[in-house]
Amino acid sequence: QKEVEQDPGPLSVPEGAIVSLNCTYSNSAFQYFMWYRQYSRKGPELLMYTYSSGNKEDGRFTAQVDKSSKYISLFIRDSQPSDSATYLCAMTLNTGGFKTIFGAGTRLFVKA
Amino acid sequence: DTGVSQDPRHKITKRGQNVTFRCDPISEHNRLYWYRQTLGQGPEFLTYFQNEAQLEKSRLLSDRFSAERPKGSFSTLEIQRTEQGDSAMYLCAAFGQGPTGELFFGEGSRLTVL
């Protein structure tokens, strides 16, 4: 079993839809939870991070963490064609040095 | 711009050849990470450096792989006797200054082994 599970999709939605992306994890020692966005043939870029359970909002994006269920989500409101990318969940352990484990990534297509 | 540059962006080589990738982070990033990403997968941790010291290596890093970070600045990742299974994107990332473990990735070096 992988430490971080993420449905690879692809997920195709019409422009303006609300998108829900999810990950589950098995290691309760993960401390920081992040979402990265990766465009084709580019490196991942940090989109959002959270530390504790609850919601964090940034513009059209909301990150949600439920540590009791070991479940994290990213919601995208009013999705745009420019949101088409691969979304990677990531979780970090602090064991003296930070080590980040990534999910497989979900490919999102937003159709105009 | 993340301040992390990688070179070359794409390398095509024949099986059995050696290849070397270089990563240049901006100077204040004292932690540097190497990840490998294959098609349809997320980045997988390979190794990381604190300044010039290599502190952790993944089991993915076979003895054909070697990474260095002389003087704690740029880093190189060398793959000897390449195999077709080495074909992947090799990503370098610098660790952010904040407490969250944010990684700033370069554009990656894509390796194709024929």
Image: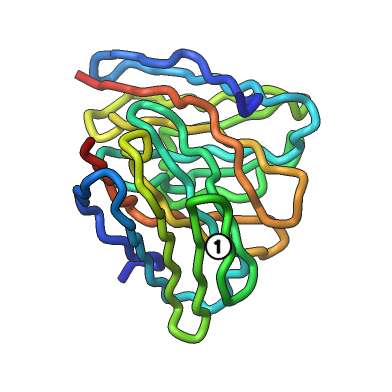
For mark 1, what is the residue?
Answer: A33
Horizontally, is A17 left or right of B74 in the view? left
Image coords of residue A92 (percent x, y)? 58, 60
Please state which of residues A47 and B7 is positioned toward the viewer in this rendering: A47
The residue drawn where x is 58% and y is 53% is A58
The residue drawn where x is 22% and y is 49% is A13
Q: What amino acid type is highlighted by mark number 1?
A: Phe
Q: Crowding at label 1, few (<14), some or many (≥20) Cα neighbours within 10 Å? A: many
Quarter of the figure with residue B32 = top right
Q: Which quadrant would the N terminus of chain B be assigned to in this image?
A: top right
Q: Chain of mark 1?
A: A
Residue at the farthest bottom position: A68
The residue drawn where x is 53% and y is 37% is B34
Horizontally, is A3 left or right of B99 in the view? left
Image coords of residue A54 (percent x, y)? 57, 75
Quarter of the figure with residue B62 = top left
Q: Which quadrant would the C terminus of chain B be assigned to in this image?
A: top left
